[in-house]
């Protein structure tokens, strides 16, 4: 079975934090409803590399992602510029940096 992202069914959906999520099965929907925080992207869906490198929130291509220790990280990918490769070269440091930058980012907007 392919473990990559797939489009969910419009008949199996759940509203969470103002976003509609579509699922392939009721089982997936129920797992999400039981603990939606577990499935949230890091850095509110911004590019993990940009957050770790510069502390900036940058739009992503949701099909360019990586799961690390059960956490979902998304990346900017315009075809010519794909930050996923740069992330993989220094992932541990970028995660540490991104987490620190994110704390400051959130404090500024609150």
Image: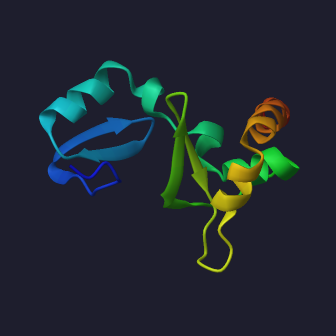
Residue at screen point 45% across, 25% down: 38
Of residues 103 and 91, the one nearer the viewer is 91
Residue at screen point 53% across, 46% down: 66
Answer yes or no: is residue 83 visible: yes
Of residues 106 and 81, the one nearer the viewer is 81
Residue 81, picture quadrant: bottom right
Instruction: Report the residue that reaches farthest toward the bottom.
Output: 80
Is 58 rendered above or below residue 105?
A: below
Where is residue 97? Give x, y as percent. 83, 36
Residue at screen point 65% across, 68% down: 82
Is 65 rendered above or below residue 102?
A: below
Left or right: residue 103 versus residue 68 is: right
Where is residue 102? Give x, y as percent. 77, 35
Instruction: Report the residue that reaches farthest toward the front.
Output: 89
Instruction: Report the residue that reaches farthest toward the top.
Output: 34
Where is residue 57? Give x, y as percent. 74, 52
Left or right: residue 103 versus residue 75 is: right
Please name the colour scheme applied to the rendered image: rainbow
Residue at screen point 16% across, 30% down: 27
- The image quadrant where one finds the C terminus is top right
Answer yes or no: is residue 106 visible: no
Q: How many marks?
A: 0
Left or right: residue 33 versus residue 81 is: left
Left or right: residue 40 versus residue 107 is: left
Where is residue 22? Give x, y as percent. 26, 47
Residue 43, picture quadrant: top right
């Amino acid at each position: 079975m392919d473990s990559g992202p797939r489009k969910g069914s419009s008949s199996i959906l759940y509203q969470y934090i103002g976003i509609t999520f579509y699922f392939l099965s009721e089982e997936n929907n129920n797992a999400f409803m039981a603990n939606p925080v577990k499935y949230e992207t890091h850095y509110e869906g911004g590019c993990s590399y940009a957050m770790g490198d510069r502390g900036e929130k940058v739009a992503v291509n949701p099909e360019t992602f990586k799961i690390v220790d059960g956490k979902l990280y998304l990346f900017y990918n315009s075809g010519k510029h794909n930050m996923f490769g740069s992330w993989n070269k220094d992932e541990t440091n970028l995660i540490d940096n991104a987490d620190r930058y994110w704390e400051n980012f959130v404090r500024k907007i609150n």
